[in-house]
Amino acid sequence: MVKKPDLLPGTLDMLILKTLTRAPLHGYGIALSIKRLSDDVLTVEEGSLYPALQRLLLQGWVKAEWKMTETNRRARFYTMTPAGRKQLGLEVSQFELVIEAIGRILSDAQEA
Amino acid sequence: MNPLSRFFRKLSILFTRKRFHNELDEEMAFHRAQAQKELEAGGMTSDAARFEVSKQFGNTTRLKEQSHEVVGLHMETILQDLRFAIRQLRKDPGFALTSILILALGMGVSVAIFGFVDAALLEPLPYANSSRLVSVDENSAAFPRSNLSRADYEDWKRQNHSFSAFDVYTGMGYLLRAASGSEPVQAARVSDGFFTTLGVKPMLGRGFLPGEDVPGKPKIVMLAYGTWLKRYGARHDVVGQSVMLSGDAYTIVGVLPREFTFAPRGGVEFWTPLLDKNGCESRRSCHNLDGVARLRDGVTLQAALGDMQAIAARLAQLYPGSNQGQGASVLPLTEIIVGNVRPILLTLLAGTGLLLMIACVNVASLLLVRSESRRREIAVRGALGATPVRLARQFVTEGLLLAGVGCAMGLLVAAGLMSLLTSLVPKNLAGNVPFLDLVRLNSNTCWFAVAIASLAALLLATTPVMRLSFQDIRDGLGDGDRAAAGRFWRRFGANLVVVELAIAVVLLVGAGLLGQSFYRLLHVDNGFDTTHLATVQIMAPDSAYPNNARTIVLYREIQRRLLALPGVQAVGITSSLPVQCNCNTDWIRIVGKPFHGEHNEVNEREISPNFFGTLKARLVRGRFFTDDDVAAKPQVVVINETLAKEYFPGQDPIGQKLGNGALDATSIRQIVGVVADVREGGLDNEVWPSEYEALYQGSDTFFAVAIRTAQDEKASLPSIVSTLHSIDPNLGVYGEITMTDQIGSSQSALIHRFSTWLVGGFATIAFVLGVVGLYGIVAYSVSRRTREIGVRMALGAQRGTVYKMVMRQAGWLTTMGLGIGLVCAVGASMLMRKLLFGVQAWDVPTLAGVAILLGTASLAASFFPARRAASVSPTDALRAE
């Protein structure tokens, strides 16, 4: 059995924020969304998801409120705040910078 | 989100912890249910799905903890640390008690003194918008701040553009007709707007209305709250009643509120409008009023001063005879009321700061000693997986706990000290120290306590932590590894002792200098024998003594009757007693000397023939007055040596004449004698030129009597008072006090006594703490080095060498502490030189004395550990570890 790759460290917050750009989601929805959008490559462990959400709440990047789901169950929905949107932009641009740099190194290594 | 709001969010979660956990539970249960549903939809049986989900999820409790750690304040671990800290302290009650006591003392004293500083210097005066109130006065070369004359006041008030209100007040004494006879009462005459300017509203009746202060208006009076309570039984129908003051009927129009105090006129019972001009007020050259004004919006103090100076200059041109050289002074009203206590309060606050520092340093070094002996405990905890942060937090918690408990106890000490110190202020002076009522634990003092407790906590927490981080924890596991162990601590702890000793030096030098100032103040040469001298003030009703002849009969009768009392040796009368103030002055001009209208300001006193004899003042030249110097004879005057030196340098003043600026015939007096300087002003004032006129050539119904007794002068006071009453029951007799008591309770003596005792107290505590601290350091370092000493002795070191080794360390620390301390002490004394009298900030005997005292005590404190070290038996020492 092939082990699924781990999330790159430090990217979880960014991924959560990204999934919230379209619509408010509950925790399960966020996990599902990340899994689906990455074609099952990335899975978010519940053990890191909920502490991460608390961290985001504390930073004021997301807001949480209890709402009803379509199946009429109570769930905590997370919404991105303007500060969160700004943070996302920041993290994405930084991430791209890093990926690009890594890409350059890797391509250089292939040439050598 | 900034760290602060993040902290508050954490805090709010802390208080809604249960809800936080419930919501997390629900959220995760939902997640699990959804995941299970998903799996079931994919074809799994519900049991298999549940198993799969729990496998995925893992330990839910752990999950919850992880979330909680993000938001938690680590409350549990804090509590754990706290419990452990308390256990540690209980295990070592000696250490705990000592530290808490030292901290409580240091903080208590600081907070108590801060209470005074707060009440006096930080709290606004109890008047409406008091920061805009100013004291307005004249000034001259001799007086930076002198009274206003009534004519000048009227001009200033009319011409100024700076004040929205400008009023005056002046002290007054009335004889109050009471059932038991006449009683002198303190009063004040004020201009009509005085209370409105201060923003004080009467609690009963009305205040003075505009125009009610001009001559000829009805006589009305307002009562102080205390008067209303004491003399009128707090009856509400007093308004409209009439009261007899010095033979005139005054109608009571209002009562002032309880919280009203006016420090420049402390014990005033009756407030009346200015009304008729008295003899002084009809002359522009006679100054008896004090001004208080409210600055117009937008007008600065400087602008107001400029305005008033311009007016004063114009008046000086208009009336050169009376106003030449008379300028203006505009000061904040607070300056008048608390200006004289500011230096002493700030000095005391600085003293307590130093004391607190010593206290904290002492406790910090105690903590260091403990942290040293807990090295193994720390090492074991570290080995069992405690992170350095977690270990450090343990020490921080202990520091905070100590500081917290110390602070709480300190507040109790402070409350006690504040009430003790306020009760020490003599009753007759309390009215002039209006802020005493405000000295208490209020929000300001509590904040101050919290602030210094935080600083203390910081110090107590960081000292051991700093030490901890400098050392590899693993070292601690090696048992008995002592050679290198205490090195850092020794160095750091030693530095602390140097700080302690230096502070002790500063406080001891301060106390020494203040003590010397106080001693010199009390033993300053007054020019007369202050012992066995009783004094009393007398106010005779003008109606009964309308002219010279009647008053002189009274003077003679008083002297005759008092002289007849057993034990009385001599009796003298004066218009005002010595060692009071350079006041009641006169402008003189020497006949036959060039004169350009300058104000030659001298003290003016009227004395009976035997007054100087009673005082035992020394005659330098010529003669004193005789019973023959009466109105019918040529007018004569006795001058003091200072006047003789200043106005007759190198000449014989006897036979010369002096008079007022215009040399009016009635003012010309011939000098018949020179008296060695008798101190008229306060103890710390310089001696002024003074002229003494013959009592029987003038007359005043307001005078003082000095009585020299053979025995205890205090015991004779009651019989003196009763004798005076038997002469005339309508005489107002008050202020009976012995001369030594009067000098001892004068303001300068009191301020010096207070500062001496307080700083002396601080210094004593600092001394003890410093020496104990040194003892602790040396004893500790000896105990750490027992094995080393054992080895040295086993290798042949002599006891003398061991002594030398220990004493050298102690000597070095002491020398450092003393050296640094002496330098700082001179600096600190320079800062408080306003409080010094007759002694320099760098007074060598004081500095040397302190150095010797502290040096000896320090060497003694280190001698005992040294002896213990030298008496170590090498075999025991080597086996000890």
Image (cartoon, rainbow, N blue to C red):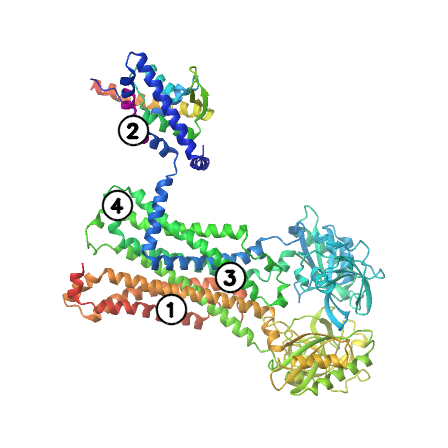
Front label number (2 vs 4): 2
Residue closest to the eye, B97 or B607:
B97
* Looking at the image, residue B767 lies above or below residue B379: below
Q: Which mark is residue B381?
A: 4
**Mark 4 residue element:** helix
Q: Nearer the viewer, residue A71 or B603?
A: A71
User: In terms of sequence position, does the residue under pointer 4 or pointer 1 come before the other?
Assistant: 4
Determine the secondary structure under disc 2. loop
The majority secondary structure of the magenta stretch comes to helix
Instruction: Residue under label 1, please give it.
Output: B854
3D distance between C-alphas at marks 3 and 4: 44 Å
Q: CA distance from mark 4 to mark 1?
A: 42 Å
Q: Disc 2 residue type?
A: Asn
| CA neighbours of label 3 inside 10 A, class few (<14), some (14 to 19), many (20+) | some
> Gap between marks 2 and 4, in whole Å?
27 Å
Q: Quadrant of residue B868?
A: bottom left
Label 1 resides on the chain identified as B
N-term-proximal mark, 1 vs 2: 2
Does A53 appear in magenta?
no
Q: Earlier in the sequence, mark 3 or mark 4?
A: 4
Chain label for disc 3: B
The amino acid on which the numbered mark 1 sits, given as a three-letter code, is Leu
* In front: label 1 or label 2: 2
